[in-house]
Image (cartoon, helix red, strand yellow):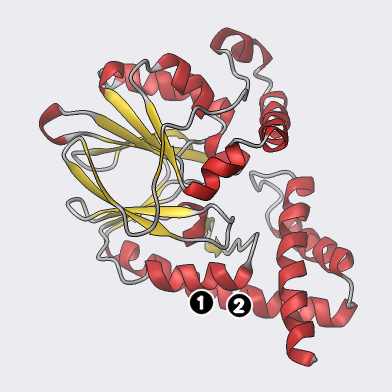
Amino acid sequence: MWIKKPGPVSERIVLLGREESCVYLVKGVKGAEHTIIGGGMIHIVPEVLAQIRDLGIDEDAITRLLVLHTHFDHCGAVPALQKRFKNLKVYVSPRGKELLANPDVVAQINALSGGMITMNKMEKQAEEFGLVFDGIRVDGAVSGGDRVLWGGNEIEIIDAPGHSSCSIGAYVPQLKALFPSDGGGIPFKNTIIASGNSNYTQFQESLEKLKDFDVEYVCADHYGYITGEEAGKFIPRSIEMAKEQRARIEKVYRSTKDIDQSARALVASIYDENPDYFLSPEITYEVYRQMVRHIASAIEKNAS
């Protein structure tokens, strides 16, 4: 079963945000400290705060936030939440910490986040809630193989590069819940979008690592969570979709021998089929340009 509506996922997991941008509250054992997994887009902050209020969750009990990677649509909400939740500590991967220390990266995330505010006509809310991406105070870094105990929940960290160089996933064995972020594929309509932005080969290798977890819930950062029998099939299906997409990219590139032209053709086909996709064509073009560049390099290397 695939559920997109914010609200309780299970007794201890709550989906917050919007359909296109999800974060998850993992409640502590016996009311202990709570953890947010995912950093979301900047424009979901007002809804996240309202949802927390309506669910009667004590803001002071929200003490940790785990950013699974540092793309603007996965960490944009964090600065506002840091200012709001006085006890909040933020954790990222070591590579994520390095990126967030770069002023150019912060400026780029701020520009893209500002675009989301404009697109959603939220200028007034931005002023009211202080929605500006002015950097994240990183309190700690976690790496694949780490097992942290937050609020009585053991959380296993999984290195999952390929979607981005800083991508990690998280698994909570007590809850059989996997939080793969975009490193596990993006559920969208009747398909799964394989988004191996930074290194497609690493993306496929990361999917292989994610497939062996015993899951009852796959909590995606976009378009909700998958539960029941479908949850166990999600990562294997992502693996197949990644293979199909790679073959499609290879075919287009071999026909054009041009990275930009290939990326434009692929993006055009996406928006012909899905004009309501949550990212703008400009951003999607940059994503596909990165993927085509990597796959083209692999093709040329194998040919030499």
Image vertical order of residue 111 relative to residue 297, above or below: above
Report if the CB atoms under discs 1 and 2 are less than 8 Å apart: yes
Going by the image, does 171 lie left or right of 234? left
Residue drawn at (22%, 28%) of the image? 33
Instruction: Give amino acid for label 1.
Output: Glu
Instruction: Give amino acid for label 2.
Output: Glu
Q: Which residue is mark 2?
A: 244
Q: Which label belongs to residue 240?
A: 1
Q: Position of residue 298 (x, y in %)?
A: 72, 80
**Residue at the bottom extreme of this rendering:** 304
Q: Is residue 117 visible?
A: yes
Q: Position of residue 188 (x, y in %)?
A: 54, 55
Q: Quadrant of the C terminus?
A: bottom right
Residue drawn at (20%, 51%) of the image? 175
Q: Is residue 6 visible?
A: no
Residue drawn at (60%, 77%) of the image? 244
